[in-house]
Amino acid sequence: MTTSAIPVIDPALVPATLALPRHLLSTGDLTADTATLILDTAARIEQAIAGREVRKLPTLRGRTVVNLFYEDSTRTRISFELAAKRLSADVINFSAKGSSVSKGESLKDTALTLQAMGADAVVCRHQSSGAPHRLANWVDGHVINAGDGTHEHPTQALLDAYTLRRHLGEIAGRRIVIVGDVLHSRVARSNVLLLATLGAEVTLVAPPTLLPIGVGSWPCAVDYDLDHALPGADAVMMLRVQRERMGGAFFPTEREYSRRYGLDGRRRALLAPHGIVLHPGPMNRGMEIEPSVADGQGSVIVEQVGNGVTVRMAVLYLLLSGASEV
Amino acid sequence: MSILVRGAAPYGETPTDVLIADGVVVALGADVPAHPAAADAEVIEAADLILLPGLVDLHTHLREPGREDAETVASGSAAAALGGYTAIFAMPNTEPTADTAGVVEQVLRLGESSGLVDVQPIGAVTVGRKGTQLAELAAMATSAAQVRVFSDDGDCVHDPLLMRRSLEYVKAFDGVIAQHAQEPRLTVGAQMHEGEMSAKLGMTGWPAVAEEAIIARDCLLAEHVDSRLHICHLSTAGSVDVVAAAKARGTKVTAEVTPHHLLLTDRTAVDYDPVFKVNPPLRTDGDIQVLRQALADGVIDIVATDHAPHAVQDKECEWDQAKPGMLGLQTALSVVIRTMVESDLLDWRGVAAVMSENPARIGGLAGHGRPIAVGEPANLVLVDPKATWTVRGADFASLSGNTPFEGMELPGRVVATFLRGRPTVRDGVLAAAVATGGR
């Protein structure tokens, strides 16, 4: 077995102006240059392990990454776990179930516990918006926001941008339509900020009830009419719609939602010929997206999952190997 | 015991001497030397200081009984005296709720035994503040606590029929309903002001309309039944319009604004530090400007602190898990000086009106908010208007430290507070507690 230490990007060679923030809490904290550094690093990681029998780099040997998950999210957790393990870090999964959290330990006490154990990075998923920001006050290690309440999910946006770049080349100038429950979506917030920073033209499409008051200040356009927004778009990103939103009177019925905002074959055909279809998963097939579209030509939904591991490797690598502010 | 306050400027006007004896002001200016009590009076040099009637807070949370780890009547009274207050109204959202004669009398007695300010209990409007059944309002009114202000503060009396009935019922004893205006269905899960910041931070918004709709409804109800309505912690520009219109029609409505709503905005939530979480939430710069002007114009009648102490663990957590509320008693006067006096929106007469006279009148507290004149009770505060100080929550008399003004440099320092002639604060330091007589 040969796992030669390939320095993907030597942190010492990263100029200070390209230093990442100490914690990855919001894509709003990234500049076009730092975001591009992450995407470039991911691309080099992908090249470095392509075709290798052992897809593992020794870069983070001896470092400890804690997955602190207060919400069930199997796909995000295993993606981060795989990313850390492929960099040879030690990974600890700390979930709210089966730990002191369910007995009522405060976030601060949990943070101090992880701190005492010497966590180099804490990957935090939490149902409360801003919980990773609070956590960052109490630990010395790097905090990575893996989704907080209805706020942000930065690595999802980075993997989406990575996927877009692979298929569309440059992101700047591309027209990207994001459809669905923007109000409650951390994916939408992170994507709007990141894609705007990278120069894309983003249009949000949703019923007015599922757009936040104040969305007018975001760096994007807003449309209530999917058929109006889709023609010629380079990509469409469908957001998961929680069925339990029905109780909040956000829309009358699933059927009406699907009719007005679901992506079916006819709407799919409105995209530019090279247009692609994204979804952060898990999908409600038949609700926001038709199975034939999800599985059809131009759908990159499965590829997004694989890219997620690569992008998270890049984030962990850059933060933990010193290319961030101290 | 007699005290001569030498050279202070009442209401910031012409400096004079004020002689206090047996709890009342007995002589002013040139009449002081001839007064028999002047001979052995203790002299307090007060040149360059301003003398105001003791401050009155219509909206204080003292947490006792029930949460004595966050605040007690004694610790809250100490904070009040240090803040220049001589009377505070204690909100009834304690455990148990102050919804019976027994509980309001308990709070009254605790206040009397601490003896630093007059603690006037507020009674709950509904049993357990549940909003379903009227509490025994008359029993509280006729108890030793002589309750005149009733409020379910923390929650809105949202049932319109119950609100109508309570407004009508308290007319029998000149009571007033102090409404926490919050439409509950429009604020399910609400965390902060609904606007650009809530959209950015991904937190459920608390829309201004949820306050304004209730105020509009209640002004109409108060007009219909010809009763007195008081609006707690009014926080939006739209609410000012509604109250101004109601007052123009002759509705008996009064309104309060908090110091924090005069100074802080929703942008403070940017780091998710729950010390800035409060209900109603901090609003926008535009709201602040309108609130200050309304206070200057008299559309808003008073400044009330909504002093809300919380234990460390109830604030050192996730934003949506934290309890809403912030300390106010020891910063209120300074914030009013910063926001209203320094901007020439209020003079010191105006400060006395909105922080002492008007709240005492609304709450029916006869011995407070009185003129600085011979024969009047000596409930007074001496303020150094030129002093500045830096806010440190840990230094406060409150058992909690949740001040949103931490680290801020604020103008104005309370030098001395007198409760019926007795100094409760001297040189900015708490005097030993004293036993009190009646109110």
Image (tube, grey):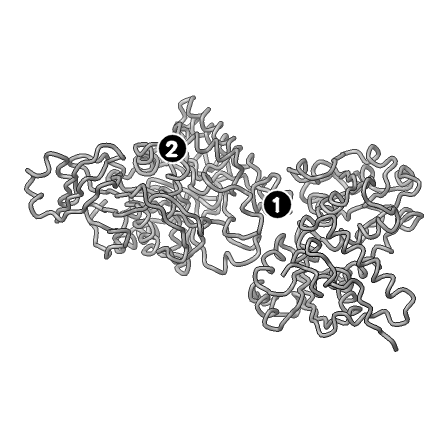
Instruction: Kindly identify which chain the residue marked by label 2 belongs to.
Output: B
Residue B5 point in image, percent of width and height: 18, 43
Packing grade of label 1 (10 A; few <14, some 14-19, many >=20) is: many
Residue A251 point in image, percent of width and height: 73, 39
Give the camera-side residue of A109 and A272.
Answer: A272
Amino acid identity at mark 1? Thr
Residues at marks 1 and 2 on the same chain: yes
Disc 1 element? loop
The answer to whether B325 appears left or right of A150 in the picture is left
1 and 2 marks in contact (CB < 8 Å): no
Residue that appears at 50% across and 60% down: B313
Q: How many marks?
A: 2
Packing grade of label 2 (10 A; few <14, some 14-19, many >=20) is: many
Indicate whether A82 appears above or below B132: below
Quadrant (top left, top right, bottom left, bottom right) of the C terminus of chain B: top left
Residue B28 sits in quarter: top left
Q: Which residue is mark 2?
A: B301
**Residue B128 visible, this orientation:** no
> Which labelled disc corresponds to residue B204?
1
**Residue B80 visible, this orientation:** yes
Disc 2 element? loop
Q: CA distance from mark 1 to mark 2?
A: 31 Å
Residue B302 point in image, percent of width and height: 37, 36
Indicate whether A203 appears above or below A67: above
